[in-house]
Amino acid sequence: MNRPYNFSAGPAAMPVEVLQQAAAEMLDWQGTGMGVMEMSHRGKAFMSIIAAAEADLRELLAVPDHFRILFMQGGGLAENAIVPMNLSRGGAVDIVVTGGWSQKSYKEARKYCQPQVAASNEADQHTTLPPPAGWQLRDNAQYVHLCSNETIHGIEVHELPDLRALGSDAPLVIDFSSHVASRSVDWSRVGLAFGGAQKNLGPAGLTLVVVREDLLGHALAICPSAFDYKTVAANGSMYNTPPTYAIYMAGLTFQWLKRQHEGALSGVAAMEQRNIAKAELLYGFIDQSQLYLNKVAHNCRSRMNVPFFLRDESRNDAFLAGAQTRGLLQLKGHKSVGGMRASLYNALPLAGVQALVDYMRDFEQTQA
């Protein structure tokens, strides 16, 4: 199927195979006479869907047995409140500010605990990463928060810090919304990971939380029951009605990921190699161009979200209009940053990046 290439930062493109299967099953899921949206979330049919989704995700991300996988709602933005309500105990929390999303995390946490900015790249306009050796971590911090990929500014932490090596016993909390399933996770360095599904895993409406079991059971009294991780875990993500159709779509995406191969690699490892190739192709072209510019330091450029600017910004509208005619969609940068942004999530093939590079080259030549 020939479709335009969708570079949206989220909700984002989904694998065509997944969309086709969902369309085929829309009116009747496996002979039940019902679509998934119509099912009781406690019926046998949906219970089999959520169980398979959890098992497939645990396999794909190599989640250890002492972590619980929770399917929740509210997106990453809600987790900025739900995490401190569950883990902070109302005490000290250290937050590393690497861009717009971690700034939101800090502001939200102030309602529930005593956060401090342990490090920030704001002085560099969020184009670098503060080295972990310089983070100001408190001995009494209940956790350290890190957004490991900043969607807006195009910053990615390619190696998660080992907090123990930095002298901290606090668990590391990562917001991996925009790079989940694009690379492996070192769970030995993570206490909790959360992310909205609408970039790499499925449609908006589903939030994934992967939490170490020893971190359960410490929610503040003000935490709503439906957002208490211990309650959610004890009820198999069924304490309240879960986002059933989004879980189904994510489950189809997990199955699609398991089918992906790159040489001897499969699943997330295969996707990581593809994502490296896509990012190298686009950044490589930008770096040799006389028209386009990426401002992020090379060692922390995101593989998922590539912001770039035209050196002559009076040509922005013409660039976007031309891209639209070539079937290259949703390239406009975030309103707080401007410029352009190409999001290269798992569902976007290498051919889509090549088509973008070809267009960017053609457009630049018309400006000469």
Image (tube, rainbow, N blue to C red):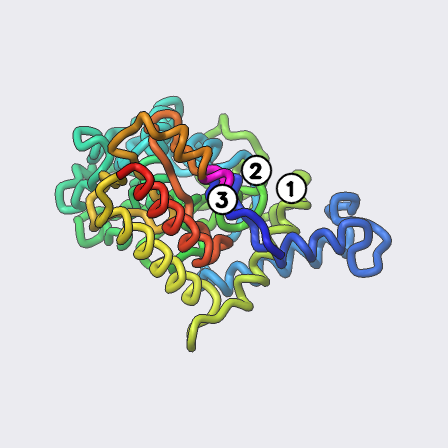
Q: Which residues are magenta?
A: 323-330
Q: Residue 203: which numbered mark, if any?
A: none
Of the residues under marks 3 and 2, which one precedes in the sequence? 2
Do callouts 2 and 1 mark residues in contact (Cβ within 8 Å)?
yes
Disc tally is 3
Q: Residue furthest bottom?
A: 264
Examine the rendered structure and indicate whether residue 44 appears above or below residue 5.
Answer: below
Q: Residue 129 lies in magenta, yes or no?
A: no
Q: Nearer the viewer, mark 3 or mark 2?
A: 3
Amino acid on which disc 2 is placed: Gln
Residues 90 and 109: in front is: 109
| Quarter of the figure with residue 51 | bottom right
Q: Provide the residue designation for mark 2.
A: 73
Mark 2 neighbour class, 10 Å CA radius: few under 14, some 14 to 19, many 20 or more: many
Q: Residue furthest right?
A: 33
Q: CA distance from mark 1 to mark 3?
A: 35 Å
Residue 229 visible, this orientation = no
Please tell me which residue is depicted at 40% across the width and 55% down the height of the picture.
354
Q: Is residue 307 left or right of residue 216?
A: left
Q: Residue 326: which numbered mark, if any?
A: 3
Residues 214 and 358: in front is: 358
